[in-house]
Image: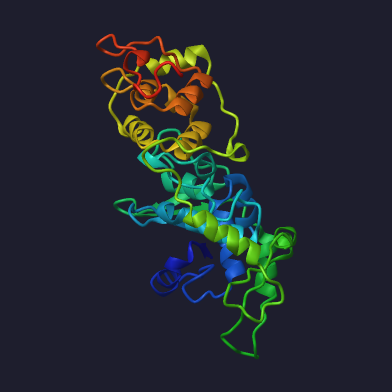
């Protein structure tokens, strides 16, 4: 039994000759949502469900439109049935940010752990729960054996098949009793076109489309972020801050932070630093970092946040220039 996102179901069955948990003809939205919940959930929680459903997990890790790129969509589908997995319907907190930096929620997910296991520094799948048994030549397909598979659940499913007629090929699967508690949390999804549905879900749909259409701030003045969306920052120790400041390098992360500050993208700025406070202190090859750029482009809110995170305005770049030496005329004397 192979667990994978439904896109690959036909290939797993037709080419691999293995049973798949879902494929392109799986019309049961709630079942797809459960699969999405497993793949996008925290590794430990995901294993507690997966061990009752499958023997292996297949991840498409080929870059481009791979499972990591699709993952926000998987999370949204999961949240549409298992409400509360995200703080809002579009699950923006589950994403890959600029520069390839994963959000905290994504970095803790099963999909990210299996996708990036051994490839991204510091990312490792739990060897007590998963064992990689196959990796294709260029790493596009990775297959993991699920450890500690529930024999009781596997036997129960095999012994409780229900077919629409004796000898029929149509035998819809049943969930084992061990998943009863998880399944009790679901809310059957009502699509907009389901005119005969018993329960309406207009409020959820309304929130979804409102958040989907809210693209965030654009270049220019910083946008005010509601207090309800702000979370506490983690301030690093002085030793940790000093260590980060010793490394000057032009890389994806410095480019990402420069672009966010230049574009006045305060929402992305907050989101990044809430998950990765160390990025407040990074330095580019010329010795400059977020505090210099915030002063240069006149971003007062960003400067205040950087101060909260302990970013010094007394450090100098390679030419001896400090952040306050290049403060934008628009905010001079007010910050």
Q: Nearer the viewer, residue 105 or 53?
A: 105
Image quadrant assignment for residue 185:
bottom right
Q: Nearer the viewer, residue 40 or 141?
A: 40
Image height of 108 relative to 278, above or below: below
Q: Nearer the viewer, residue 17 or 235?
A: 235
Image height of 34 relative to 68, above or below: below
**286 left or right of 276?**
left
Q: Position of residue 123 (x, y in %)?
A: 46, 37
Tell me the residue at 48%/71% (across/down): 23
Image height of 239 relative to 284, above or below: above
Q: Position of residue 285 (x, y in %)?
A: 26, 21
User: Does residue 54 show up?
Assistant: no
**162 left or right of 252?**
right
Q: Position of residue 252 (x, y in %)?
A: 32, 34
In what quadrant of the picture does the N terminus appear?
Answer: bottom right
Image height of 138 relative to 244, above or below: below
Q: Position of residue 243 (x, y in %)?
A: 42, 15
Tell me the residue at 45%/23% (across/down): 303
Tell me the residue at 60%/34% (across/down): 231
User: Does residue 128 show up?
Assistant: yes
């Amino acid at each position: 039994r192979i667990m994978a996102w439904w896109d690959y179901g036909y290939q797993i069955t037709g080419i691999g000759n293995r049973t798949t948990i879902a494929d392109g003809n799986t019309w049961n939205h709630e079942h797809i949502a459960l699969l999405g919940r497993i793949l996008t959930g925290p590794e430990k929680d995901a294993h507690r469900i997966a061990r009752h459903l499958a023997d292996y997990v297949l991840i498409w890790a080929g870059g481009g439109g791979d499972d990591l790129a699709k993952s926000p969509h998987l999370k949204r589908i999961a949240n549409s049935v298992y409400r509360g997995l995200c703080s809002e319907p579009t699950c923006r907190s589950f994403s890959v940010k600029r520069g390839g930096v994963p959000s905290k929620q994504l970095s803790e997910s099963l999909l990210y752990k299996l996708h990036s296991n051994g490839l991204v520094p510091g990312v490792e799948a739990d060897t007590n729960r998963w064992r990689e048994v196959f990796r294709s030549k260029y790493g596009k397909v990775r297959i993991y054996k699920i450890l500690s598979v529930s024999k009781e659940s596997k036997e129960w499913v095999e012994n409780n098949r229900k077919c629409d007629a004796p000898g029929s090929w149509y035998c819809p699967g049943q969930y084992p009793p061990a998943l009863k508690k998880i399944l009790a949390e679901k809310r059957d999804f009502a699509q907009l076109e389901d005119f005969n549905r018993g329960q309406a879900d207009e409020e959820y749909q309304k929130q979804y489309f409102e958040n989907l259409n809210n693209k965030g701030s654009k270049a220019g003045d910083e946008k005010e972020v509601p207090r309800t969306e702000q979370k506490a920052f983690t301030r690093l120790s002085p030793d940790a801050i000093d260590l980060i400041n010793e490394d000057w390098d032009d890389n994806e992360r410095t480019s990402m932070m420069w672009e966010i500050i230049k574009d006045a993208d305060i929402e992305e700025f907050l989101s990044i630093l809430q998950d990765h406070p160390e990025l407040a202190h990074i330095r580019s090859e010329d010795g400059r970092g977020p505090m210099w750029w915030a002063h240069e482009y006149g971003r007062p809110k960003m400067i205040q946040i950087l101060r909260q995170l302990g970013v010094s305005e007394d450090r100098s770049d390679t030419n001896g220039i400090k952040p306050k030496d290049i403060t934008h005329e628009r905010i001079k004397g007010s910050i």
